[in-house]
Image (tube, helix red, strand yellow):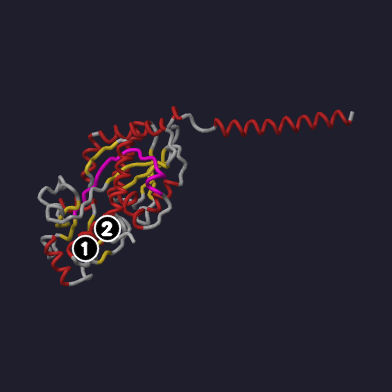
Amino acid sequence: MGRQQSKVRFDFVVIFLVSILVCTFTSFCFGAEDPSKYPSRPITLIVAWPPGGGSDLACRKIAELAGKILNEQILVVNKAGGAGVIGTTALVNAEPDGYTIGNVTSSTMVITPNLRSVPFNPTKDFTFIVQIAEYPMPFCVKTDSRWKSFKEFADEARKNPEKLTYSTAGPLSIAHMFVEQIALEENIKITHIPVQGDSELIAQLLGGHLDAGLSNAMTPYVTSGKLRALAVASGSRIKELPNILTFTELGYKASMDPFFGLAAPKGLNPLVLRKLQEAFKKAWEDPVFQEFEPAAGHTPVFKDSETFTRYVLKEYDEKGKLLKKLGFVK
């Protein structure tokens, strides 16, 4: 009788353990969400810059519109610091399930990775979803400043090396590198003062703590009369500032057409990618977003996933060669 009870107990333990293994294996194989049912819960959109800047505002608006199309909320989370590196690192380390996406820019995908070591590879570690904008940047001073043109600013900087100050949304950003290229062409030295994002930059400039700044978020302050634009860093003029010449029109060789888009970690399911691309395209086409973007300092420009991917890779290669030629990459 004892042997029979022992055998029954042994058989029960074996069956129990096998059941656990089967359940574990089944969960492992089939526990992932069916991509056709995506999304079934809120999506997180990481913004690699502080709240209140052009990137943050644009992401919040298009997230609001795309969330309605997907019937799920898209929650914007700011992870600022390191010229966008902190937020971009958080994005690349997330699960490629479509529930964590993030904004990517020329600074985070092109300039910074070419200048220093970062914990991600922009050519291998991302699934690029869509480009939604370019962001032409006015070079601005306070309205009551003594400089009426960039030539006047450059002439004073030449007479007083390193005395004049300026800032951008982040050190080693595309805006920072652009001004350094201009300074190199002019053979002048101006001092870059690091700040954390557009909001701090504008506050510092309006408060008289900086002489100048370069940021797409400054356009509304120019149109309202609080700042004066001396030139525009872009291939074309800003629609809201039609009389302000570009640096190219002023005769400079430095060029900049910074992009702004959305990406996910590599390995995103193609069906999920298609759903995100379609939702953000519809959101981008919404007249509300088209009207909002210029107010955020952006020019609406759409590229689908395939086109955007090719563009990022081309920019990374070409700008890397340019930065090396100019001596920024050792």
- Give the tally of numbered discs: 2
SS assignment at label 1 = helix
Q: Which picture quadrant has residue 158?
A: bottom left
Q: Position of residue 88 (x, y in %)?
A: 39, 49
Q: Does 22 sit left or right of 319 as displayed? A: right
Tell me the residue at 86%/28% (across/down): 4
Q: Position of residue 313 (x, y in %)?
A: 33, 44
Q: Which residues lie in the magenta part?
A: 121-138
Labelled disc at residue 325: 2
Q: Which secondary structure type mostly characterizes the magenta part of the structure?
A: strand
- Answer yes or no: is residue 313 visible: yes
Q: Calculate the distance from the C-alpha at mark 2 to the C-alpha at mark 1.
A: 12 Å
**Quarter of the image where the C terminus is located:** bottom left
- Answer yes or no: is residue 65 visible: no
What amino acid type is highlighted by mark number 2? Lys
Labelled disc at residue 123: none
Q: Which residue matches tag 1?
A: 184
Q: Nearer the viewer, mark 2 or mark 1?
A: 2
Q: Position of residue 322 (x, y in %)?
A: 27, 54
Q: Does 20 sit left or right of 45 as displayed? A: right
SS assignment at label 2 = helix
Q: Position of residue 91 (x, y in %)?
A: 42, 46
Closest to the observer: 149 or 327? 327
**Quarter of the image where the N terminus is located:** top right
Question: Is residue 215 placed above or below 70 in the rendered structure?
Answer: below
Tell me the residue at 26%/59% (across/down): 326
Callout 2–callout 1 Cβ contact below 8 Å: no
What amino acid type is highlighted by mark number 1? Leu
